[in-house]
Amino acid sequence: MSETIAQSQSENYSKSVGTSAVVLAKGGGTRQSGSGLITVGGSIDMPRYVTVHNNHGSQVLYLGWGSDVSTSNGLPVPAGEYRTLRVWYDDELWAIASGADTDTRVYVLHGKGDPPFSVLDLSPTLWVDASDASTITTDVGVSVWADKSGNGNDLAQATGADQPATGTRTINSLNVIDFDGTNHFMTTASEVRLSQPNHVFLAMRTDDISFGKYVFDSYPGAAYGGWFQIFGSQYYAYAGAGVLGGTTETSPILVHITYNVASSSIRVDGVEILTGNIGTEDLSLLTLCARDDEAVPFNGALGEIIIVNGTLSAQQISDTETYLADKWGITI
């Protein structure tokens, strides 16, 4: 007999899992695996996020969906570890243990709907958000765009003629910082060396797709750093080598650049448009919307920038892209 936990509850429960699979969570839809294929151990009314903990001392637990129940088709959860999964309305989440006659104890935590996404959960090195008026200091234009990561990596421009505009444009009714493609640029005050891998997320709009416009540049001392350009009709990212491709858009877009040597990539609106070897250089002292020598300035608007040092999981990337897309009205 199945056990049902109401959607309004937020609690955990346990189920024994051996070599015969057990259903841990079941949505309200009809795409289920059918009777006789697996043993029903418990169900939850339309769960959204489920955390499964493998409490066994040595055996691996495997999690999966659908009727093809086997360890080879499951996501492995090593002994003592846990995984958090997003379960949709018509999903059925099963678990199966790896060892013969092995009893593995699991815990499923069910809460109300989606937990709120927080950029701070990514431990960002830099996070600026033009929709947050409290982070913008103005003079002639924007003199300081404050970092919300807690690391103090503010972007600044002391020269009035070089300060970008605020309060003049929006994306999805949210304020953006507008760079004119002539004088406007900003820089971080101090050098923060970020070795690869790292990730850069941008909610942005390009007004001019002329050759070589720099969205950002970084210059670690005598070495070339990492940068991202509007390369005419294509996008270009570089960190000692380069990846070039895609088709430049002039509508608002979400860009995600992964700097990770040969496994580097550029994603636009949630779609990977190119991969390749981007080189090994660090991200460092950041120049926003121009090259480090203030040449080839970017013409367009920036809504939000998130820079994360280290590796992000596929789920973290998806959550970040979804957060930015929902906020800035971008379809991914």
Image (cartoon, rainbow, N blue to C red):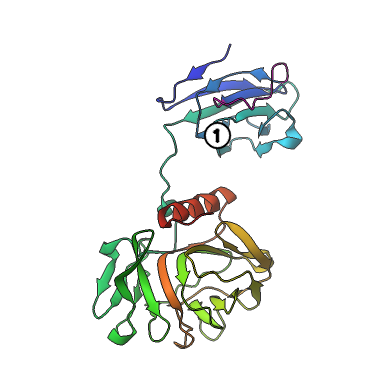
- Magenta residues: mostly which secondary structure? loop
| Residue at the image position 46 percent from the left and 83 percent from the top | 297
| Residue at the image position 63 percent from the left and 31 percent from the top | 57
Residue 122 location (% of width, % of height): 46, 54
Residue indicated by mark 1: 88
Q: Does the image show residue 63?
A: no
Q: Residue furthest left?
A: 139
Q: Secondary structure at mark 1?
A: loop
Q: Residues within 10 Å of mark 1 (few under 14, many from 20)?
A: some
User: Quarter of the image holding residue 160?
Assistant: bottom left
Residue 268 highlighted magenta (yes or no): no
Q: Is residue 245 left or right of residue 3?
A: right
| Residue at the image position 44 percent from the left and 34 percent from the top | 113
User: Quarter of the image holding residue 245?
Assistant: bottom right
Residue 29 highlighted magenta (yes or no): yes
Residue 320 location (% of width, % of height): 49, 53
Residue 139 location (% of width, % of height): 23, 78
Q: Amino acid at mark 1?
A: Trp
Q: Which residues are magenta?
A: 26-37
Q: Is residue 111 shown above or below 219? A: above
Q: Residue furthest top?
A: 1
Q: Quadrant of the C terminus?
A: bottom right
